[in-house]
Amino acid sequence: MSFISPVVPAFSEKAQERVRDARDFAWSASRHDTFATCPRKYYYSYYGILEDPEVQRLKRLSALALWAGSVVHETIEEFLRTNDAIPEPAVQEALIRSVVHGRMLNEWKESEGGILGFRLFEHEYTQPIEQEDKKILVGIVMRSMKHFFKSSLLREAFRVKRSAWLSMEELVSFHVDDVPVFLRMDLAFRDERDRVRIVDWKTGRSAGKFNDLQIAGYALYAAEQGWVSSATEISTELAYLFWPRYVRKEVTQPVLDHARAFVTRSAKTMRALLADPEANTARIEDFPRIDKPRICRRCNFRRLCFPRADALDVRPSRRSVAKNP
Ligand code: SF4
């Protein structure tokens, strides 16, 4: 398989950030998603991870589809940090090739080589990866990057210049009542009509379950920061780079009100299971496992719930490779 450049460190900055952030309760759309998927997975992801190196290692496993998403996101971030103009097609092509043949290849070898450092879910759980899966994966990365360079969003972001960029991949936080909320925007900038545009690069083929909520969270932060005087001055752009397809969502005050209420309710439900909500401590027995083999089969923590290697050993469908990261 030909595949990328600098190897991701054994415990990347973002992963360390995740462990640090878990010490205090802070709401995020992905936290809500994990809790809604499986309480035990939620326990491992936000509490078990604080104590147990094996939970930390399993949490960092990346399934193929998620890997493609991370590669595209990190390549776009690096490109935006170091460039102020769209390069010539030949340079774009060289960059994409270096990502596939450099970074991805290195990570692939690292994953095959052992349990430390970058590790694919499929290697950890010895699931066969067919040639076709690899082709799909490389296709997602190459197509997404090609469409990124052609996107009008990128042209607009460069046209307004970096001084009009409001946020790019920074972990930021704000409060909804007494609940700290964490989020990270791919890119937010003030456009030529003085509107705030919040961009979310997507490599999946369809909308995720909590897209609207995530977007409302971005808009809440923009309003909180005083970037706008009214919610209607914000628009969010879901950029499905694979197709490519661009979905613009206008924000209204009722959308923000709904998001606030949702966050408050969701945080209350999660905190209700804690042994000590003030200290943010939890007991594993208060977070039950689910009985859904289809979900458990794709879960990073399945080794902990089903120690017998063959307990859930069913070949995943090819669709899961191309699924929304
Ligand atoms: S394997 Fe299943 S029960 Fe266990 S944490 Fe994962 S989703 Fe939950």
Image: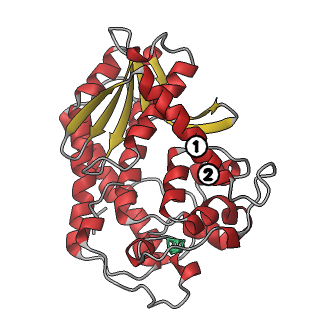
- Residue that appears at 72% across and 61% down: 50
Given the image, on which type of amino acid does mark 1 rest? Arg
Residue bearing mark 1: 265
Q: Is residue 165 left or right of residue 129?
A: right
Asked if labels 1 and 2 touch by Cβ distance under 8 angstroms, the answer is yes
Residue 220 visible in the snapshot: yes
Q: Quadrant of residue 107?
A: bottom left
Crowding at dot 1, Cα within 10 Å, few <14 / some 14-19 / many 20+, comes out as few
Given the image, on which type of amino acid does mark 2 rest? Thr
Residue bearing mark 2: 269
- Residue that appears at 29% across and 20% down: 156
Q: Nearer the viewer, residue 46 or 86?
A: 46
Q: Nearer the viewer, residue 41 or 270?
A: 270
Q: Nearer the viewer, residue 198 or 107?
A: 198
Mark 2 to mark 1: distance in Å?
6 Å
Q: Provide residue 196's location: percent of width, then percent of height.
A: 41, 18
Q: Provide residue 115's location: percent of width, then percent of height.
A: 54, 75
Q: Is residue 220 left or right of residue 233?
A: right
- Residue that appears at 24% across and 70% down: 318
Would the CB of label 2 be found within 8 Å of ligand 1? no
Crowding at dot 2, Cα within 10 Å, few <14 / some 14-19 / many 20+, comes out as few
- Residue that appears at 45% across and 12% down: 230
